[in-house]
Image (cartoon, rainbow, N blue to C red):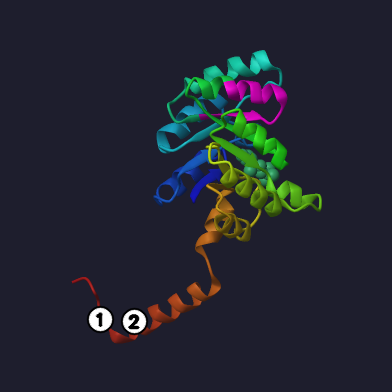
Amino acid sequence: MKFFVDTADINDIKDLAATGLLDGVTTNPSLVAKSGRNFVELIKEICTVVDGPVSAEVASVDYETMLEEGKYLATLAPNVAVKVPLTEAGLKVCKYLSGKGTMVNVTLCFSSAQALLAAKAGATFVSPFVGRLDDIGQDGMGLIEEICHMYQAQPDLKTQVLVASVRHPRHVVDAAKMGAHVATCPPAIIRQLFGHPLTDKGLAQFVADWAKTGQKILK
Ligand code: E4P
């Protein structure tokens, strides 16, 4: 499974890219607003740091403007994935851009029916939001499971399931077990994936015991 980071913070992106474990980046208008950065400059910079897909979201909701924005965003770098909302207009834009060879991430997906339409529209990625479904008492991971099964049953559909709105490491592990292709996580969740209290405790013990030997591995 691929790991994308869900942020517009360039320092977090650089830091996580340095691990060699980062496969891509997703941004959205809320994250860009939080960064305080110029959107176009930010996307260009992220694309120089990360080789994998970098999602850049259109801002308009009508078909014509969304299409022009999408075409422009696609010129910023070869690894831009144009992000469009899962609306009728968004899927029309998806169909057009994917037909021209542009990567498209269809976002704000909350149902399997929507995911089916995104795949038919040629989406590279569909982004079901698990945390926001959990927040309203629905089953976010249940949706991922159903979409994964549905896509597996229709081998002509090539869209990758990009698990979004991830709230904790369990979401990531369950997504991997279900066969989702990508999880996009806030930086803090990716850092949480590395850790376990018993790793910290065990390492402290090893460091202390090693000191007692008085030895060094490197001369
Ligand atoms: C996905 O691309 C979205 O940017 C993101 O995962 C939304 O997550 P949120 O529900 O935490 O805002």
User: Is 93 part of what is drawn in magenta?
Assistant: yes
Furthest toward the bottom, the residue is 212
User: Is 135 part of what is drawn in magenta?
Assistant: no
Which of the two discs, 2 and 1, labels the residue nearer the N terminus? 2
User: What amino acid is labelled 2 in the image?
Assistant: Trp
Residue 204: image location, x then y, percent: 45, 77
Q: Is residue 209 left or right of residue 188?
A: left
- Which corner quadrant holds the C terminus? bottom left
Image quadrant, ligand 1: top right
Q: Secondary structure at mark 1?
A: loop
Magenta part of the protein: which range?
Answer: 81-95
Residue 210: image location, x then y, percent: 34, 81
Instruction: Tell me, yes or no, if residue 56 can be seen here.
Output: yes
* Residue closest to the eye, 50 or 159: 159
* Residue closest to the eye, 156 or 148: 156
Q: Residues within 10 Å of mark 2 (few under 14, many from 20)?
A: few
* Residue that carries the numbered disc 1 in the rendered image: 215
* Residue that carries the numbered disc 2 in the rendered image: 210
Queried on whether the Cβ of the residue with tag 2 lies below 8 angstroms from ligand 1, the answer reads no
Q: Are marks 2 and 1 in contact (CB under 8 Å)?
A: yes
Residue at 61%, 28% in the rendered image: 121
User: What whole-number distance in Å separates the C-alpha atoms at marks 2 and 1?
Assistant: 7 Å
Q: Residues within 10 Å of mark 1 (few under 14, many from 20)?
A: few
User: What amino acid is labelled 1 in the image?
Assistant: Gln
Residue at 59%, 23% in the rendered image: 95
Instruction: Tell me, yes or no, if residue 30 can be seen here.
Output: no
| Up-down relation of residue 41 to residue 207 (above or below) | above
* Residue closest to the eye, 48 or 37: 48
| Up-down relation of residue 171 to residue 36 (above or below) | below
